[in-house]
Image (cartoon, rainbow, N blue to C red):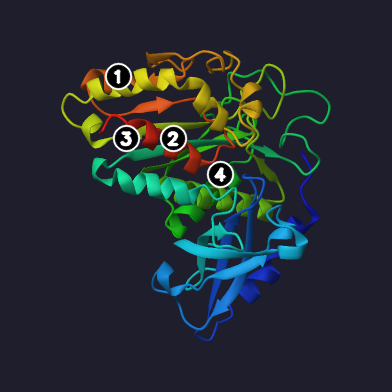
């Protein structure tokens, strides 16, 4: 059994006593933001005198950007701008989680604040009602750096028996997956499914459909909830696109895209047009589909393990080895959506959805 963190082994019954104490009308609000790595999430909590009815009731706050890779110590204050509010599944009602944008000292977006430009792009094409769904793959690790529940000396059985599996010899960490699912539902995150993935200790959850900027907001909060649930269990969820070298599947964040025209009668022609245009911008998209400009995805997109090659663009119906997959049902119905299988598990959903929005908007004008 992979090791767990000491803090996860504290007596949870003792904690529950304090969690059940009344709050005397006060409300805890946990502010969440993306740090300077573009992948890490940070959070801190403050007390409000009453429960906020909307995100507009939550005040701006600040933090020390020199401790989050976002500022110099000599000018370290950064602004937290609340943009999206959720219920808190850890301290329960009336407490809230609030996702924030980060602004620099001059009130301009921080370098890893891609939400601002994404929101602007989405607003410009709002009438086309672009829907997204993102499939977040992740891998559970122990604090010893080994995949959770993998043998201490050696490897588990080869891939084949783990995808959508059941049984103690196949599915590792289901408690975490089910707790995360419940936490998302309680919070108001638009989670729509989950399943065990091809590699043991690897799982996936799906968020969507979400329109416009909501896709990025809901996926980032779902990620926060995942890390927070894993913290309680003493394990680590990694979004590394290739967490284990060798003959094991990597982890992606497949992105489903649909416009109003694509969903209507005869929408397949618009799907095909979008795919053709995507092929012309393949290298450009690859650069932004992980935070390190394609370098992480290079380890994953090899053409093996249900991936396309990072160097080539391809598309096909029901083809999981293609860059873009058109589901078979969409091919039969002649309308629906397409799936971009290139984004890495650690992608920024604001960057991915903004790219698709900008790409599609070129065909709207």
Q: CA distance from mark 1 to mark 4?
A: 36 Å
Q: Residue furthest right?
A: 153
Q: Residues within 10 Å of mark 1 (few under 14, many from 20)?
A: some
Mark earlier in primary sequence (3, 1): 1
- Label 1 sits on residue: 272
Q: Residue furthest front?
A: 106
Q: Secondary structure at mark 2?
A: helix
Residue 33 appears at what percent x and percent y? 58, 57
Count of marks overlaid on the render: 4
Mark earlier in primary sequence (1, 4): 4
Q: Name the residue: 54% across, 55% down.
A: 109
Front label number (3 vs 1)? 3
Q: Which quarter of the rendering shows the N terminus?
A: top right
Front label number (1 vs 2)? 2
Residue 91 appears at what percent x and percent y? 56, 68
Front label number (4 vs 2)? 2
- Label 4 sits on residue: 177
- Label 3 sits on residue: 361
Left/right placement of residue 59 relative to residue 315 reads: right
Q: CA distance from mark 4 to mark 3?
A: 36 Å
Q: Secondary structure at mark 3?
A: helix
**Up-down relation of residue 106 to residue 342 (above or below):** below
Mark earlier in primary sequence (1, 2): 1
């Amino acid at each position: 059994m992979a090791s767990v963190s000491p803090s996860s082994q504290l007596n949870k019954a003792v904690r529950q006593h304090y969690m059940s104490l009344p709050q005397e009308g006060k409300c805890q609000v946990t502010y969440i933001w993306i740090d300077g790595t573009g992948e890490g999430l940070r959070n801190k909590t403050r007390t409000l005198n009453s429960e906020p009815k909307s995100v507009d009731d939550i005040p701006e706050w600040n933090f020390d950007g020199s401790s989050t890779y976002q500022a110099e110590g000599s000018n370290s204050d950064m602004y937290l701008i609340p943009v999206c509010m959720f219920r808190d599944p850890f301290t329960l009602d009336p407490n809230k989680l609030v996702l924030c944008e980060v602004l620099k000292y001059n009130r301009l977006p921080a370098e890893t604040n891609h939400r601002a430009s994404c929101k602007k792009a989405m607003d410009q094409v709002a009438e086309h009602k672009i829907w997204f769904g993102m499939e977040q793959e992740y891998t559970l690790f122990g604090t010893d750096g080994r995949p959770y529940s993998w043998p201490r000396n050696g490897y588990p059985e080869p891939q084949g028996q783990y995808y959508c599996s059941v049984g103690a010899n196949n599915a590792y960490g289901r408690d975490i997956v089910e707790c995360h699912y419940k936490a998302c539902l309680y919070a108001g995150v638009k989670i729509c499914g989950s399943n065990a993935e091809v590699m043991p200790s690897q799982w996936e959850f799906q968020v969507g459909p979400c329109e416009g900027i909501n896709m990025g907001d809901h996926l980032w909060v779902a990620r926060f909830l995942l890390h927070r649930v894993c913290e309680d269990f003493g394990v680590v969820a990694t979004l590394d696109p290739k967490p284990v070298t060798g003959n094991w599947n990597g982890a992606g964040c497949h992105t489903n895209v649909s416009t109003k025209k694509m969903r209507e009668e005869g929408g397949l022609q618009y799907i095909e047009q979008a795919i053709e245009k995507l092929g012309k911008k393949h290298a450009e998209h690859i650069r932004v589909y992980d935070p390190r400009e394609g370098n992480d995805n290079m380890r994953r997109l090899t053409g093996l393990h249900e991936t396309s090659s990072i160097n080539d663009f391809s598309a096909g119906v029901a083809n999981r080895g293609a860059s873009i997959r058109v589901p078979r049902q969409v091919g039969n119905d002649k309308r629906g959506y397409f799936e971009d299988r290139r984004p890495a598990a650690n992608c920024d959903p604001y960057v991915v959805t903004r790219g698709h929005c900008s790409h599609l908007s070129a065909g709207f004008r």
